[in-house]
Image: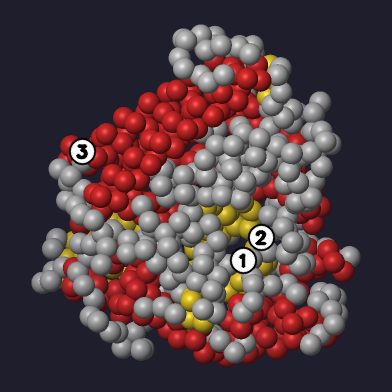
Amino acid sequence: MNLNWLRHFPDLPATLPPETRPSDLARLELSLAFPGRDFSITLSPSLGDSFILDTIGATTILTGGETGLLYGAYALIRSHLSGSPLPAHLESAPQYPLRVINCWDNMDGSVERGYAGRSLFFEGGQFAYDPGRMRHLARLMASVGLNVLCVNNVNVHEPAQGLVAELLPELSALADLFRPFGVRLMVSVDFSMPLRDGLDTADPLSEAVQAWWQRTCARVYAEIPDLAGFLVKADSEGRPGPFAYGRSHADGANLLARALKPYDGALIWRCFVYNCRQDWRDPSTDRPKAAYETYQPLDGAFDDNVILQVKNGPYDFQVREPLSPLLLSLRHTHLALELQLAQEYTGQQIDLYAMAPMWREIFQDLPADRLQAIAAVSNLGRDENYFGHPLAAVNLYAFGLLAWSPRIDPAEVFDNWACLTYDFSAADRRTLVQLLLCSRSVYEKYTAPLGLCWMVNPGLHYGPNPSGYEYDLWGTYHRANRDAVGIDRTAEGTGYLLQYPAELQARYADPDTCPDTLKLFFHRLPYDYRMPDGRTLIQRIYDDHFAGAEEAAAMATVLKALPFPEPDAAVIADRAGRQVQNAENWRDVINTFFHRLSGIPDAQGRRIYD
């Protein structure tokens, strides 16, 4: 069907008995992958998702919980096929109990920010899926330890409300396909759903509304007893929420959490809340401050089955952002980190962009135990290879392993994935791994270096448009003029930096010591500002864009020379060529934009358009 990291895994039977459990599947997977090899497999329910592996002579002893046995089996298979031997004794437990894929699929079959074809689950307002692909997707997820799939878009539209009403039997049938692989479903719900069912209010303090959600949860869990819970986006970008009734987000989240509580369901509440009707004329406007200002005063006010899901980066999945200060300030509230697999601002699964190095940076400042869950917006679609760009598969693979162990080495992840995916020589595999490791840096150079954000085409979010959002309502400004560029977010500016702990304030407060990668995120600097290497700011902007375009062209040449099999080779070659064109366009548009503003020529005399 497609080339991904399961291509060397033995084929499972065409159907599985309906009562198949993850522990049963673990035994089947091991018997298929290692025919004739001795295994001692012990189910220890208290271990849950965890497992213990011991090798004594020719015998491998696997002990684990119901799902832990399955994850242990997949760890053995991955190790065997990638040539990365496991130690004689291994105890492995996931860092986070919920390791979630958030799909942004709409029931008409479209996918919001989807770059790999139409929805795998829906078409024409109904469920429309291939059961074989569902099982394959479940196996993909389980093979890297992912255990929750939220199937529908967090921006809930009609008829998605039917997922907790008349379409429940179909949702239950889908849950049956994922259950043997230890994957539980989750559903996005709309805060105003009671209004669509005859109530005249969705006020979270209304007894009628509370009773409505209690009835809804009872109905849902009667059909799907192991549903992971609900995902909610409220009071953001036009979505309804408790603010309409003068209530807090703790009031709104606790309403749903209490309805889910009898069933051990989690309520994941997104913190992507900000004013999307801002005035660009107001220099005090600073969108990244919004999440902290909304939620930090509510720390400790949420029920224990509420998880606040915080985006990586206080803006919105930009190429480079600092860690959200909200993740560091909420110490009495359960938290989830939200990442984005779908490459909305990072190349849209056309340009190569391997994300694991970016994610690894997050945990340099964020204690891993601060989180109770981790989630990523899906890059999946109905394309034959699931991901549009075959190499984009590495991001889902890496996310699963990082969700299990946040300190994992990206180079090791990429090498294992390459081993499992392509029959390359060791030299070709090393070349591919190096391309993946440098892909983020290349993309960053030719698009938005130094912490600049939002220089993209509005709506589409692909390709350069340095003024596209500059005078819009979304709070997405870089405020470049003839003298300077960037936002002063220090205490003398918008004050955003004051949301951080003292250690990070000290790191970012002085433009001379602030890392180059975030200089223009935290500071407004003149074009003749001297960077640490002696170059002026404007020369650094020119140099990065020229270098990024050159590196993208070199990367494309190397990619096209690697022995990818068909159909991957043709797709990779096509997208590498498109990336080169994109990089050249970014180089010319951004350099020309700043040249026209500043009037300062390139010191190396390269072509910049007047």
**Residues under numbered marks 3 and 1 in contact, where contact means CB atoms less than 8 Å apart:** no
Side of 526 where 398 appears, left or right: left
Instruction: Check the image and name the residue furthest to the left.
Output: 36
Q: Is residue 201 above or below residue 548?
A: below
Residue of label 3: 561
Taking 475 as reference, is 592 left or right?
Answer: left
Q: In this rendering, which labeled residue sits more in front, label 3 or label 2?
A: 3
Q: Spatial distance from mark 3 to mark 2, Cα to Cα?
A: 43 Å
The residue under the point 51% across, 9% down is 603
Q: Nearer the viewer, mark 3 or mark 1?
A: 3
Q: Residues within 10 Å of mark 2 (few under 14, many from 20)?
A: many
The residues tagged by marks 3 and 1 sit, at their Cα atoms, a distance apart of 41 Å
Amino acid at circle 1? Val
Q: Quadrant of the C terminus?
A: top right
Residue 278, compared with residue 35, is above or below; it is above
Residue marked by disc 2: 270
Give the CA separation, mark 1 to mark 2.
Answer: 9 Å
Quarter of the image for residue 178 reads: bottom left
Residue 62's quadrant in the figure?
bottom left
Estimate the x, y position of residue 218 in percent, counting from the top left.
Answer: 65, 88
Q: Specify the label residue 154 is tagged with.
A: 1
Amino acid type, mark 2: Arg
Q: How is the image coloured?
A: secondary structure
x then y, percent, for residue 168: 55, 87
The secondary element bearing badge 1 is classed as loop
> In this orientation, which residue lies closer to the viewer: 601 or 23?
601
Image quarter (top left, top right, bottom left or bottom right) of the N terminus: bottom left
Image position, residue 608 (x, y; %): 51, 19
N-terminal-most mark, 3 or 2 = 2
